[in-house]
Image: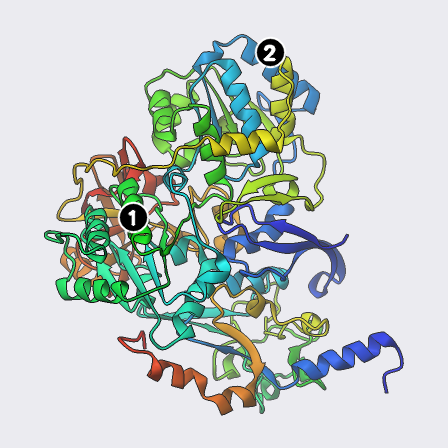
Amino acid sequence: MPETIDEIKIEENVKSYEGKRIVLDIDRCIDCRSCETACFYSHVGHQNLTHAVSRQIAAFPYNCRQCEEPVCLDACSRNAIERRDDGVIVRNKFLCIGCLSCAYACPFGVIKEDLIRRVVSKCDLCVSELSEGEVPNCVATCTSGALQFVPMDEVIEMKKWGARIIAKPGPHRI
Amino acid sequence: MGIHKVICHFCSMQDYFGLTGESVFYSVHYGSQNVVKTKHFSERRICPRGNFCNELAQHKHRVGYNLVDGEFAKTDFALDAIKESFSAMDKSRSAILLSGSLTLEEALLAAKLGEKWGTKLVAQIFPEDEISAKFLNNFSFADLSKMQAVIAIGDIFSLHPTISKFVHDARFADRKNFLAAIDNCRSRTSRFAWSFLNAKPGSVADVIEALANAVSCKEYSIENTGVDESAFEQLVSILKNTENAAVLFSPGIGRFSEPLRVGFWAKELAESKNFQFASFSTGSNARGISRLLNSYGFEPINKVIDAIESGEVESLMCLECDPIEAFPKIFNRIKSMKLVVTTATLPTAIVENANIVISSKHLFEKKGTLLSPMEKIITMDDPFPSPDYPGEMTLLKSLLENEGIRPTAEISEIKEHLGAFHFISEPPDVMKNRSGKLTAVGYHTPHHHGDGSYTRRASWVIRQTKDKDNSVIIGLGLAEEIGVSNGDSLVVSTDAGKSEFSVIIEEDQLDNVVLIPAYMPNGRDVLGWCKSAGFVPIAVTVSKP
């Protein structure tokens, strides 16, 4: 049980972000790469988010999906990757030896293979921001509103991403 | 150190965000270090350039020192040296160039100094912002996301990324809402547009003039503009039935051959239907500075550069700007000048070639006022702490006192000068079209604008984009015709100059344009110079090296 006001606040914040994921509205992303720069500077040069551009038509920032069954965690030989109680999958910087097993195992290619100071970089959802009631920095800085931090079940239920594309008249980018 | 509510010195939207210095635990070094962190509470988010403010505040190459003839100097000594050097000059043959990221107070003091010296050559350095300053905006960011239609002229998403959320919100607010784009090439903005009028380079002004006339039920013609007639008529029909819309205009560099005329007819289009209108500048305060200097009767930037090029100018003072990277052709002239004084925060080319350098502050480290895109004067009163760099204010005050003028900059005086500005009211003359079979058109990216002299020094850019920054963009058909693929080298020649770039191929780009990086010095080298509006598109030939 939380005993101090700070502990209560932290517990409330944890409840507010549990089950939330970063999702992309593809029809908004303008490929400005603000999310990348925010990630770069907020992780002191360890950029955990990159993106791809498909035939100059659409851009896809891709970051860690915080999988239900993370293969990166299974692949890590040093137990450097762990799932926290709040569901966020993080990499322990002190244990990581930069063997790249997690990067090779990740089916979405979101763990970068280029090592920075012999350490692998992985999205941690900016947990320090989350515990203060904020959103991940890539979401906070997204200029077009393409990256959103929302409960996964809500997104699935609303089906709004697909519905929006069908509803708009005229040609679409995808 | 608390959170300081600051305005990005790159932000043409003048959005605010928090900067705070924090001690961050950094595992690899097993220790801690102080870093500047961004706190996100801005309405319009932060584009890549805004994110660079973290780094710029404590950049490892920051000019935190004064230099006199290459030697480190204390501020008093450097200021005395400047006063002494100018006293030996014919000050009426001096020029003062200002960045678009100064405060209105600094611009006012620079204007007073120029007036006292008897020179007409005082200008802010972004030619594109002199264009946008000539139009009075009537829009609000809050209303923008409720618009039925947004008409984007130029690549607003690249130059002003923080506006994209409002535009998208407007697009998605209702099923009938839409975005229309008018440009001479495919851009980051046009790819989202429901209606895209892709005009031939040199004919965008004609298209917008025709659109303004058509919406007002007057006679019009879109002959020889390259615009599809049915798409044009469809857009006219929709605009006629639209009650609330916004026309957004961003001149950019080397984008339009007649940017003044483009802006004029865009404004006419907006006024004909009581739409909202906004012309955006790239500098964070360039509109205000341009108008303020204009009210003193100073020459526009193109006349100042012409004067430097012809050798009329014997001494130059640069306030937080780099004319060598912005206008590479005047490099030799600047080198041969008797005196070059500059204020600087980073070691740009002008710092290496100046006689005296005064260390300066970034906009987010200053107090002062700015003119917002919504035509309001906003005050910055919570600067991010910085060491005691003298900057422009100290330099200008020192020089004005030396001239026997009280260096005051009252807000009432600033308002008076801004109020004296005459907005463009008559359609500018039609100019000779300088495009050809193949035309060089300037482009920017969200992480670069202006001359790119600061953004290219950000470590994210250095690590992530590398040499991709110095690339021309061409269509697939043209690439096949020349026989080049992505990453190959290409020599671009125009009447203005010749330079080598690497190639980026975009499938949806038309084959009659070559997109030139207008934020690179060699990109600006090959774009044409226009007598009234800075760089313009120009006929071009391309070949393999």
| Residue, disc 1 | B268
Tell me the distance, in whole angstroms, between the alpha carbons under discs 1 and 2: 51 Å
The reply to the same-chain question for discs 1 and 2 is yes
User: Residue at the left extreme?
Assistant: B223
Q: Residue at x 35, y 17 (%)?
A: B311
Task: Give residue B358's position: percent from left, percent from top.
Answer: 61, 28
The residue identified by callout 2 is B84
Under circle 2, the secondary element is helix
Q: Earlier in the sequence, mark 1 or mark 2?
A: 2
Quadrant of the image containing the N terminus of chain A: bottom right
Residue type pointed to by label 1: Glu
Question: Which of these two is toward me, B150 or A18?
Answer: B150
Looking at the image, residue B65 lies above or below residue B94? below
Above or below, B11 against A68 in this view is above
Q: Farthest residue toward the right?
A: A3
Q: Are marks 1 and 2 in contact (CB under 8 Å)?
A: no
The residue mark sitting in front, 1 or 2, is 1
Kindly tell me whether residue B26 is visible in this rendering.
Answer: yes
Per the rendering, the mark at residue B408 is none
Q: Position of residue B278 (x, y in %)?
A: 40, 51
